[in-house]
Image: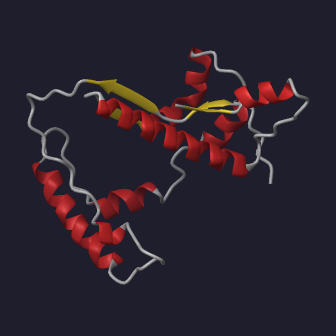
Amino acid sequence: MCLDYYRIKSAGATHNIEVKPESLDALVTGFFDGGLALQNMMIAAQSVGLSTVTIGAIRAFSDEIRTELNLPEHVLPLVGLVVGYANTEVSVTPKPRLPQSATVFFEQYDDTNIVADVQSYDEEILGYNATREGQKSTAGWIEKTAGFYTKNVNPKFVNQLKNAGFKLEE
């Protein structure tokens, strides 16, 4: 899945319209639209009996991917999507999810029980991680997720944007 402003920039030029995809708003819109398209592809695959796995690490290698795929300026790889048939002979315990009370709100944000809900989920994930098949983890959801955001996850990202022709503007 790529953020692709090359297509509209090229088409706009045929009508003397100068498309400027460099704004932060344009990037956020493109990321959001890409996420919606990805979700639709996953739902479509599932509707015909296929399974999907997203590959978020694609973003960390966008320069290499752009070179390998000969992507033009203003096209930026965002996420990969593997589509295929799931191995139904293997029993897998579904990973628990955050409770809806911590993620779904009506009319206004309600943080009344959010810390308690997340802490309860953290305990559930610790139990799941200790017993799951394959790679086990001793970290809970809070430690892993909060820790992820304590540093710049992809320090190359701004340069990757610039290399793809996105010169960020206010």
- Relative to 145, does residue 107 appear above or below in the rendering? below
Viewer-closest of 87 and 41: 41
Does residue 38 appear left or right of residue 87 in this picture? right
- Relative to 64, does residue 117 appear above or below in the rendering? below
| Image quarter of residue 161 | top right
Q: Which residue lies furthest to the bottom in this view?
A: 112
| Image quarter of residue 97 | bottom left
| Image quarter of residue 118 | bottom left
- Relative to 140, does residue 84 appear above or below in the rendering? above
Q: Which residue lies furthest to the front in this view?
A: 47
Colour setting:
secondary structure
Q: Position of residue 145 (x, y in %)?
A: 38, 58
Q: Residue furthest right?
A: 16
Q: Where is residue 129 in the image (x, y as percent from the top left)?
A: 18, 52
- Whether residue 56 appears in this view of the structure is no
Does residue 65 appear left or right of residue 163 in this picture? left
Q: Where is residue 91 in the image (x, y as percent from the top left)?
A: 8, 37
Identity of the residue drawn at 44% across and 38% down: 40
Q: Position of residue 76 (x, y in %)?
A: 62, 32
Identity of the residue drawn at 42% across and 33% down: 41
Does residue 153 appear left or right of residue 147 in this picture? right
Does residue 117 appear left or right of residue 161 in this picture? left
Split into 4 quadrants, where in the image is the C terminus? bottom right
- Whether residue 81 appears in this view of the structure is yes
Identity of the residue drawn at 55% across and 23% down: 65
Identity of the residue drawn at 65% across and 35% down: 160
Counting the numbered discs, the total is 0
